[in-house]
Amino acid sequence: MATAERKPKEAPMQVGQKRMSLRSSGKRLIDLGLLYVSKSGAIIVGLLILPFFSRQLGPDLFGVVALILSLQSFLILLDFGMATMVGRELAIVQATDSQRYITWRAAEWLVSALYLGISPLALLIPTLLGSPWGVVEVLSCVILFWALTLQNIGQNALFARRKFSEAAIVQLFGLLARHGVTAIALVCVGASLTSFIISQSAVAVVQMLVTRWRCNLDLCTHSEERFSVGVRTHAAAMLRRGRALMLFGLAGAAVLQLDKVIVSVFMSPRELGPYFLATTFCLAPISVLAAPVAQFFQPRLVQALSSENPAAVQLTLNQFIASITACSLLPTALIWLLREPLIALWLQDGNDVAQVAHYSSVLLPGVAIGALGYIPYSMLIAKQDYGFQARLSLALTAVTLTAVMISAIHSSVFAICLVYALYHSVSTICSWWRCTRIDATVGNIAAAGALYASILVSLLFSVVVFFAAIAAHFN
């Protein structure tokens, strides 16, 4: 009678490798989960706390607060491209500990010199604008913007070093502390602009110092080599390389903010309201769903490209595409199908629901395609193709804002939505095209990646059309 063959036992080394692989996969899932919690938490906290600030400060002071909060987002982009460059330089394989440390410190030095230089000019604001601006308020704003910009650079440094959990935790708790302390100050100290700005700036400085401490632990070595390179010399070199990135950031900020100004100038505030709500509804899911995936995969893609290992690049690229599709495009497709009930639930007011849903029907697919633009953007950053990004961004911004102005003159908000859907789509397509032209190896990998992304998007589009047709039939 034949005896059943026994499976050979796995060698201890194989068992150990499997355990290490499982631990690594588990850590990656935890990192990505914390990034999602941090990003979604920031948006949710912002949505919940803003009405409280409005009630405490009143419409006039809250208008100033809205301006300050808008300037935060805008000025973080005007960091001479330092956050992007730090993220790229710290992720490449060939960089030494000394080079990483000097790059991070040079970026901090450059931004600090910028804010130190504009501080005397900022002191003219009280004279020009008067109440409620005073010297204390203006200097506190400068400190707030400076601290948040350095915090963003440090956070990108931690992302590049794959310290995702630490960066996400510091970001989330820093935001909670900043808004929490501000709320307490408005209630206990006084509902004034001074209380708001000082509390915001104080907590922002603490958050920035915590981030710097964590960066120092990872980047600072006991080698004296790091002191042999002049920080200021390195900062000057980074400034020359970052000019294109600054233009890219300026153009991006302009194209995403000036449309509201154009609509309010050429049309009425009543017509701006539903459009503003539609853009908020369409951009929020992408920010929550796609941005954490991009933050997670960009350092990995940069590292793979710098290692000059085509197989690793292709694998990382395919994982990036599949993750964006599963975590961002698929939920966005569901949101598109259910946009009317979701918008009705969100607004709690039936007056604008139909109009916001009508605008979102065009904006949301365009923004979803734009989420795929994170992938070629990461490749272009890795290859330091900053000039093309700046030229493309400036050209698309000029064309888009011109088309928005023409549409506003003709009082067509729906046409503006079409313009922005095309803007996101064209930007993504052009970025993918550029990736195929960088060099032969990267070009072939990018072309294969673009084909893979196109197949996934086509399949998803077919499913959405199918369910939309079914919904239309039963309605």
Image: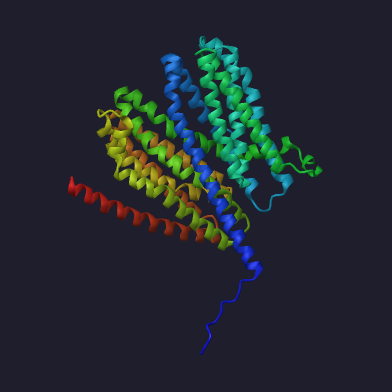
Question: Where in the figure is residue 48, as x and y percent of width and height?
Answer: 43, 28
Above or below 177: residue 397: below
- Residue with the most extreme right position: 224
In this picture the colour scheme is rainbow
Q: Which residue is drawn at 32% across and 27% down?
A: 273
In the figure, is residue 95 to the left or right of 420?
Answer: right
Q: Residue 67 versus residue 231: which sits nearer the camera?
A: 67
- Residue with the most extreme front position: 1
Q: Which residue is drawn at 58% across and 18% down?
A: 198
Above or below 345: residue 311: below
Q: Residue 362 versus residue 296: which sits nearer the camera?
A: 296
Q: Residue at x 63, y 48 (%)?
A: 91
Q: Residue at x 56, y 55 (%)?
A: 25
Asked if residue 147 shows in the view, the reply is yes
Question: Where in the figure is residue 34, as x and y percent of width and height?
Answer: 53, 43
Asked if residue 268 shows in the view, the reply is no
In the figure, is residue 146 to the left or right of 223?
Answer: left
Total labels: the figure holds 0
Above or below 463: residue 200: above
Above or below 231: residue 296: below
In the figure, is residue 290 to the left or right of 138?
Answer: left
Quadrant assignment for the C terminus: top left
In the figure, is residue 348 to the left or right of 169?
Answer: left
Q: Residue 421, located in which quarter of the rendered image?
A: top left
Question: Where in the figure is residue 412, as x and y percent of width and height?
Answer: 27, 32
Question: Where in the figure is residue 33, as x and y percent of width and height?
Answer: 51, 45
